[in-house]
Amino acid sequence: MSPDDSLSYSVTGPLVVPQFLGTQDHPWLRVLLEERDRFVGRPQRELDARLREPLPCASPPVKLKLAVRVLAKLQRSRRIGAAVPPRKAREVLFQAAARDAAPPSVVLARVAAELGVAPRELEESLFADLPGEKLLAPSASPVSPEDLALRINLALVQGLLCHAMRVKIDVEGQTRGLVRHARLRGLICTVTERSGAGGATVTLSGPLALFRNTRLYGRALGEVVPMLAWCARFHLRAECVLEGRRLTLELRTGDAVVYLRRLLSFGADPIVVEEIWLPGGLFKGLTAERLAEYKGPLYGLFETEFGTRMIRADEHLRAVSAERGAAELLGVAVGAPLLLVERVSYSYGERPVEVRRGLYETTHYHYRNTLT
């Protein structure tokens, strides 16, 4: 859930209008990513301190706050190799300081000699296990301004839904999958079939309608948003309480957040949970219905229907542990090993036009991919 001070929106009459990021925001997002890369190999606290200051270019303050929070979730870090285990270093040094009235530098040198390390190594070991002391690692896969903007737009919508009393979604296509996901996440959900027009109306209680655990419920409600990309059509209306007023948030098919999530199976076995981010301007109107109708490769659809050709792709593979959401979809235990495949696809001019993230269950299958 995004804190209130990072939600960029305007109010028009009874409507709340999200201030989505677009191409005009890509320059300062690129600077933000460059700032992040400058701190690779340095403690996390140094980057945190830098990002509390303005960027060296014009950037909307509220949008920047949300961008920093979204970027923080994408960051990887590694622990410093401490010469002495931090807990042991604190225990031995603090006990020695309590017994000895000598100056701190003298006590530090004496304890370091007893432990067989240099005083500086002992000092660096004291708090090496704190989050801020972790060293910032390079990104597992490239993050472009376009990709970051899509993620921020998604986080903005999810943050606004955390202020909802009730959410009503008119939906066509993939209704069962949407409802199943909502109930798996513990959301209070009712479904009404629409006669004549087809489809259904899904009504969800918002976090502000509850008396406790609203933060966790708000996060679960926000996870419904990516699922809407797989519906042929949708119209979401959320009754929100913002600035002490009751306002309505509306989202429709083809709005700024183009994010696809799908479960791929081999026979009856679920094998892959895949997330795809695409630039809204290039792929406006892409829905699960169009994907289902197209019988060829996904990149063929991108080229024939949207005029965007993928020229090359970079992939990064690593092993990860299954988190609860992926474990439920793939039918494995939480913590089970999965193969994470992260891909960035490029069109002409080295323009990144797709970010894909897949979690593969490889107990009985292996990953093979040929990109031409």
Image: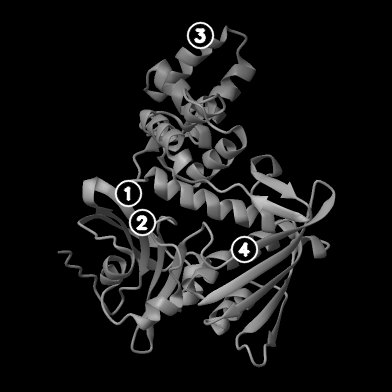
Q: CA distance from mark 4 to mark 3?
A: 65 Å
Label 1 sits on a secondary structure element that is loop
Q: What amino acid type is highlighted by mark number 4?
A: Leu
Question: Quick one: SS at disc 3?
Answer: helix
Q: Position of residue 198 (x, y in %)?
A: 60, 89
Label 1 belongs to which residue? 141
Amino acid at pointer 3: Val
Task: Please tell me how crowded label 2 is: few (under 14), some (14-19), or many (20+) other residues with Cα within 10 Å.
Answer: many
Q: Amino acid at mark 2?
A: Val
Instruction: Point out the tag, 1 or 2, that comes first from the N-terminus.
Output: 1
Q: Nearer the viewer, residue 183 or 42?
A: 183
Looking at marks 4 and 3 on the same chain, the residue that comes earlier in the sequence is marked by 3
Query: In front: mark 3 or mark 2?
Result: 2
Say which of marks 4 and 1 sits in front.
Answer: 4
Circle 3 residues within 10 Å: few <14, some 14–19, many ≥20: some
- Which amino acid does the dot numbered 1 rest on? Ser
What residue is rendered at 83% in x and 62% in y?
211
Quarter of the image for residue 104 reads: top right
224 to 36, vertically: above or below: below
